[in-house]
Image: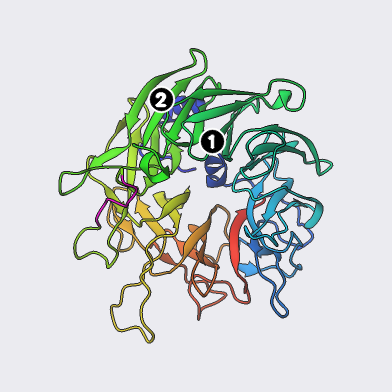
Amino acid sequence: MRLEFLGLKKILILLMWLLPGSLMWLSCGGSTPSSAAKTSGLKYRAFISNSVSAGSLSAGVYIVNAEDDLRGTASAVSAGNSPGMMVVTPNLAQTLVFSGNGTQSSDNQFSIISNATESNAAHLALPGMTESFVVSPDSATAYVALPTAPVIGQSPGFVEAIALGSGSVSGQVGVPAVHYLSIDNGGNRILGFSDNSDYVSVITPSQIGIGNAVTTIGGPSIFDRPVTAFFSSDDTTAWVLSCGAECGGSQASLEQYSFASNSVVASVPLCTTDQSNNTQCSGSVALINGSTMYVAGTPYSPAGDPSLLCPAGTTMAQYCGQLLIVNLSNMSVTNAAPIIITDGYHNRIALGPNGQLFIGARTCTEIIAPVPPPAGAEVRGCLSIYNTLTNAVGTNPAGGVLVPPENGDVTGLQPISVRGSNMPQYVVYVIQGQGVPQGGSLFIYDTTIDALENNPNNTNNPGQIFGLVGNFVDVKTVD
């Protein structure tokens, strides 16, 4: 990931100390592409999950040439009835795909795609839905959070371990209502975050199935509806993000937790003060860049209602979300006033090239223009782009936020690090459109202008790829 405005010495020190334990960090950076062509003949590929079958269109994982923004000629890889969320293993050998739609007819299929052969190497049915799975650093095991999976004699919910070599279940451990997981850098500790809980489950992977694999830390007055964590390079410290009122608690905050002393050693409320002098606290997703953490969320009142009014005259939406910037060196929020972004539940974040921070949400306030749209009609969805630079990018001023005129939930973000010589060099792939009639589409943003890319291969449709049709959910580069 590109690090802005830090001296080389400071960068090296910070990178040795701050390494996040969540998949948000893994998804932000690029990787060196293999020089060998794969089955599709492409050297730098993006996999895109398509959740619907209709006519000649098949549900599956599509392959795109991310160097030149062209659809690959290979057939879609089968990955269940409605492929969605994807995770790439650390060694880039496999892509894990979950297929499920939350209904009684959901197949809840977990697929293991071989990136070399571009085929489904193994799959198994899970005992429920998942929104979170992590992979061990050696790429041998996946751990899946299953919040509603039945457990005999206990409350529903457990973490299932899957051996990726065989595609079989290697163990499970009960963690009631476990929704999200974060794994440390060494793979020796997994933190499980359960719905409506102020406790964090500490799971020891080596003990799953053979011993006491779970202990708990935190509790009321320590954490406040925690949802994710980031780890120091030596795994002795975790920065735990508490969601607060947005997740049914009281106040969003960030806690620095020491495993050596089993205690919180520093804490900062994730709050700003709005124009009416009201305190606004939030935090549901985060990303670390050097000593800076970016935290996005939608402030809620103790009564459970959105509380941050959008600035007058800026949008037809009534309530907005906010971005907070945290200095991890002294555990302080550096922006006193809210940095306004869309509302909704923020669960996607990625730092693209050219210092552009992409923030995605679901269930935000949609502003849909009438048909035909009058001149100047507002269109607003769940994507926000924050300019971290000290100079303007396109129409986005330094430190400004741009909300592109596209509707729908944001379900996939992927910065692209390798480009063809005739292509715009600094782009981010965005999947947006779930929750609105047109469904999920792939959009390509040029981060030098914070607008849809002028794709020379599809000049009539800026930001899109010719012939790529489907209801897309997620996107990942695999080389």
Q: Position of residue 218 (x, y in %)?
A: 47, 24
Residue tagged 2: 222
The secondary structure that dominates the magenta segment is loop
- Residues packed near mark 2 inside 10 Å, few (<14), some (14 to 19) or many (20 plus): some
Residue tagged 1: 193
Return the residue found at the far front. 153
User: Does 11 sit above or below residue 265?
Assistant: below
| Residue at image location 35% in from the left, 70% down from the top | 367
Q: Is residue 166 left or right of residue 278?
A: right
Q: How many marks?
A: 2
Task: Calculate the distance from the C-alpha at mark 2 to the C-alpha at mark 1.
Answer: 14 Å
Decide if residue 140 is in sight here.
yes
CB atoms of marks 2 and 1 within 8 Å: no
Tell me where residue 149 sits by quadrant: top right
Tell me where residue 167 sits by quadrant: top right
| Residue at image location 38% in from the left, 74% down from the top | 368
Magenta region, residue range: 303-309
Kindly identify the amino acid type of the residue bearing the numbered disc 1. Phe
Q: Position of residue 207 (x, y in %)?
A: 72, 23
User: Does 432 sit above or below residue 321?
Assistant: below
Q: Position of residue 315 (x, y in %)?
A: 27, 66
Q: Secondary structure at mark 1?
A: strand
Decide if residue 137 is in sight here.
no
**Earlier residue among tags 2 and 1:** 1
Q: Nearer the viewer, residue 335 or 54?
A: 54
On whether residue 139 falls in the magenta region, the answer is no
User: Does 181 sit above or below residue 316?
Assistant: above
